Image (cartoon, coloured by chain):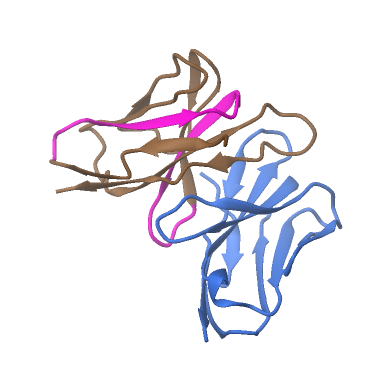
Amino acid sequence: GQQLNQSPQSMFIQEGEDVSMNCTSSSIFNTWLWYKQDPGEGPVLLIALYKAGELTSNGRLTAQFGITRKDSFLNISASIPSDVGIYFCAGQLGNTDKLIFGTGTRLQVFP
Amino acid sequence: DGGITQSPKYLFRKEGQNVTLSCEQNLNHDAMYWYRQDPGQGLRLIYYSQIVNDFQKGDIAEGYSVSREKKESFPLTVTSAQKNPTAFYLCASSTPRGAGANVLTFGAGSRLTVL
């Protein structure tokens, strides 16, 4: 099965720093979703993007749907300890209902 | 509150045994999904069902079976044919395709360990 290329794999940052992660693919997607997973729990939706070029914010989180429809990024500003977790991107392929997931970015925030 | 309930949270199994993981949702969602999560990998689709009494194989269906007798329930059986069943299993549900994607709502997961 397909998977998205998500980077970086892991990040270790200090509290207060900004974070950026992205997902890329050779395929065109109609929708991009960003999820966060706390340890031992299921992923929770952070942001959904539906149009190429769309830029959407949710508090300290900002995500963009790439113009080429083949990529997306997620930024977290002024990180705090509760931002710790694994962040997944997911894209819906243009001609299917199927969601393809990235491999995840593991974020650690140090005080 | 509406949501998805998975049980058990932790399950230990001996080799050669079948086990069934429960997934129940009260969101009135039509579609339900099972994913497997292994360290360092994204979520891989095992099975999905878009309506009652119908389901399709995902990318890694071998060694697994499902049923969809009720809209609210989508149990997953991990059979003895699954060669490497130790993993974290996630159930999800979504509304039918419409404007935008099938945004998935996930349960809290079930961790299966084979001894």
| Any part of residue A109 in sight | yes
Which chain: blue? A
Vertical side of A84 occupied by A40: above or below: above
**Left or right: where does residue A64 sit relative to residue A45?**
right
- A72 and B70: which one is in front? B70
**Left or right: where does residue B113 sit relative to residue A41?**
left
Q: Position of residue B87 (x, y in %)?
A: 32, 49
Q: Is residue B19 magenta?
A: yes
User: Quick one: which residue is furthest to the front in this view?
Assistant: B1
Q: Colour of chain B?
A: brown
Q: Residue at 58%, 51% (x, y): give it.
A: A44
Give residue B105's quadrant in the image.
top right
**Left or right: where does residue A67 sit relative to residue B41?**
right
| Any part of residue A27 in sight | no
Vertical side of A61 occupied by A1: above or below: above
Vertical side of B69 occupied by A77: above or below: below
Q: Residue at 52%, 18% (x, y): give it.
A: B71
Q: Is residue A77 magenta?
A: no
Q: Position of residue A89 (x, y in %)?
A: 62, 56
Give residue B90's quadrant in the image.
top left
Q: Position of residue A16 (x, y in %)?
A: 65, 85
Q: Residue at 86%, 57% (x, y): give it.
A: A53
Instruction: Please give the count of numbered marks on the rendered protein.
Output: 0
- B41 and B98: which one is in front? B98
Numbered range of the magenta stretch: B15-42
Q: Position of residue A64 (x, y in %)?
A: 78, 61
- A62 and B35: which one is in front? A62
